Amino acid sequence: MTAAVEGLTLLGGIGLGLLGSPHCVAMCGGIAGAMALATRGCGAPAARALTYNLGRVVSYAAAGAVAGALGLALSAALGAGGALLLRVAAALLLIALGLYLAGWWSGLAALERQGARLWRHIAPLARRLQPGRSFAGALALGMLWGWLPCGLVYSALAFAVTAGDARHGALLMAGFGLGTLPAMLATGLLAQRVSGLGRVVASRRLAGALLIACGAWTFAASGALAVLRGAPTAAPCHEAAAHPAP
């Protein structure tokens, strides 16, 4: 059961990353292209781009572990009602992320403005590491790149709070990073050709609509509707396994 849940968590993160790729290309395409151009002649471009992105995925996973641990603490403090609240919050976050990605609502831009305050302290170190000519330098630069202010990443981190614990939070965010990997690798290697795809309105709106649908399904499956109707909710799967029917 544990391996299956972990696999689903990883796949869920990958799906979130894939759907968010148009936003990643639009926001970070220029950075990925600049990194590729800055290290031209310093080894295989594909290996360099992969190293940058590996660092980015590592930073996402570390942040996801912290978010998952926070969610576990909240669930323990709030009890069963808190678990339901976190599931509903996850559903609403998916819907908000879909609206943001599609360009129908810009509320998550406020998170990016708050994140920019943190980035101001990280940016000087990132500039000193550029262009990351060694493997270690490229990896470290990629890890710092993962902290760029981004509403998509912040939403994924908030979703990781509902993952259950630090391990599942790290898996979800690692999957998110892997889901964005194809688009970001392509952007780094084919900068100008691919970066324009992130600005295609149709692709962003399709991805946003899919996220909204996922959020609506998550809300329906969370048990919140049953609570509103006054009906008992189904026990979470881990509780059902711990207390089987006689």
Image (cartoon, helix red, strand yellow):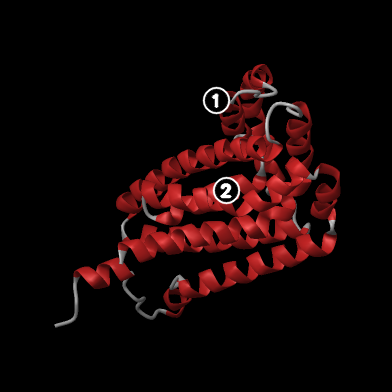
Q: Residues within 10 Å of mark 2 (few under 14, many from 20)?
A: many
Mark 1 vs mark 2: in front = 1
- Residue 199, position as x, y percentages in the image: 84, 53
Residue 178 sits above or below residue 228 on the image: above
Give 180 or 91, whichever is nearer the viewer. Answer: 180
Residue 31 position by quadrant? top right
**Secondary structure type for disc 1:** helix
Counting residues from the start of the chain, the first of labels 1 and 2 encountered is 1
Q: Residue at x 57, y 30 (%)?
A: 139
Residue 74's disc is none
- Residue 97, position as x, y percentages in the image: 65, 57
Give 56 or 221, whichever is nearer the viewer. Answer: 56
Q: Residue at x 52, y 37 (%)?
A: 59
**Quadrant housing the N terminus:** bottom left
Residue 208 sits above or below residue 227 on the image: above
Q: In the rendered view, does 112 fall on the left or right side of 75?
A: right
- Residue 98, position as x, y percentages in the image: 68, 61
Residue 119 position by quadrant? top right
Amino acid at dot 2: Gly
Number of labels in the image equals 2
Amino acid at dot 1: Ala
Q: Residue at x 59, y 45 (%)?
A: 154
Location of mark 2 (residue)? 177
Q: For the residues marked 1 and 2, what is the alpha-carbon distance in whole angstroms? A: 19 Å
Residue 120 sits above or below residue 173 on the image: above
- Residue 45, position as x, y percentages in the image: 70, 36
Q: Which residue appears farthest toward the left when viewing the image?
A: 246
Mark 2 and mark 1 in contact (Cβ < 8 Å)?
Answer: no
Residue 245 position by quadrant? bottom left
Give 132 or 94, whichever is nearer the viewer. Answer: 132
Give 187 or 84, whichever is nearer the viewer. Answer: 187
Location of mark 1 (residue)? 136
